[in-house]
Structures are given as C-alpha cells and as structure tokens.
Amino acid sequence: MKKFQAIIHFKMDDQFMTLVPAHRTYINFLMNKGIIDSYAVSMESQTCWITMNTDTKEAADQYLVKTPLYKYWTYSIEELFVYDSQHYRLPALQLN
C-alpha cells in the first residue's frame, strides 16, 4: 500500500454548502476504512489536502470522484515518499 496526497482546489456556490454533510459522511466512511489518513481544508485559500492509502494513483482518484463535491474540484494526486506524523510515533515515556 502506498501513500498519496490529493491537493484539491475548490470553488463554492450556493449549492456547495448543501452538499457538505453528504461529503463529510463519505470522508468519514473512507477514514473508518483506513483509506484516508488525514483531511484538512482551508477556507481562506479554498484548498483541501487529503492523505490516502491506496495501491495506485488511479485507485486514489477513483475514491475522489465519488464525493458529492467532486464537480467543484480541480486537483492533483502525488505519491508520497515520506509521510511522518506525531500520530505514527510511539507515545512519550513518562516515568512515575
């Protein structure tokens, strides 16, 4: 399994916000299945970053096209060579 980063730019209109609950349900489903590791959105730049676990870039793309917000997106998908996070580290040792 490889890691991919989707870098998504979006444009909003009146209908966009009505689709957000269904989109979040889909994102939560993918997170619960372990397909999405992280999901971040900036309203300031209207950009979204999604880190995904799939075998290929095409497989990552197939998950992205199923979201209700897909028609608002332009994006690229890049394979990650290194992905490190505090969540992947062992807990800090605390002596009593």
Image (cartoon, rainbow, N blue to C red):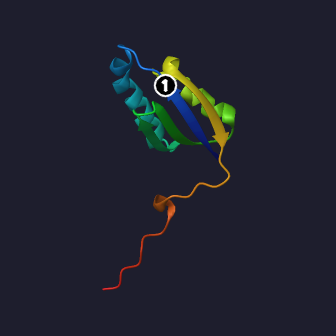
Q: Is residue 57 left or right of residue 34?
A: right
Q: Position of residue 89 (x, y in %)?
A: 50, 65
Task: Answer few, some or many: residues within 10 Å of disc 1's Cα (few below 14, many 20 plus, some between 14 and 19).
Answer: some
| In the image, farthest residue toward the bottom | 96
When the figure is inspected, residue 88 is found, relative to residue 42, above or below; the finding is: below
| In the image, farthest residue toward the top | 14
Q: How many numbered marks, from 0 up?
A: 1
Question: Label 1, on which residue?
Answer: 10
When the figure is inspected, residue 92 is found, relative to residue 59, above or below; the finding is: below
When the figure is inspected, residue 24 is found, relative to residue 32, above or below; the finding is: above
| In the image, farthest residue toward the left | 96
What amino acid type is highlighted by mark number 1? Phe
Q: Quadrant of the C terminus?
A: bottom left
Query: Depth check: 57 or 43 in front?
Result: 43
Res 57 quadrant in image: top right
Q: Position of residue 85 (x, y in %)?
A: 51, 58
Residue drawn 69% across and 38% down?
56
Classify mark 1: helix, strand or loop: strand
Res 76 quadrant in image: top right
Q: Position of residue 68 (x, y in %)?
A: 45, 20
Residue drawn 39% across and 15% down?
13
Q: Is residue 55 left or right of residue 74?
A: right
Residue drawn 36% across and 80% down?
94
Residue drawn 68% across and 52% down?
81
When the figure is inspected, residue 94 is found, relative to residue 83, above or below; the finding is: below
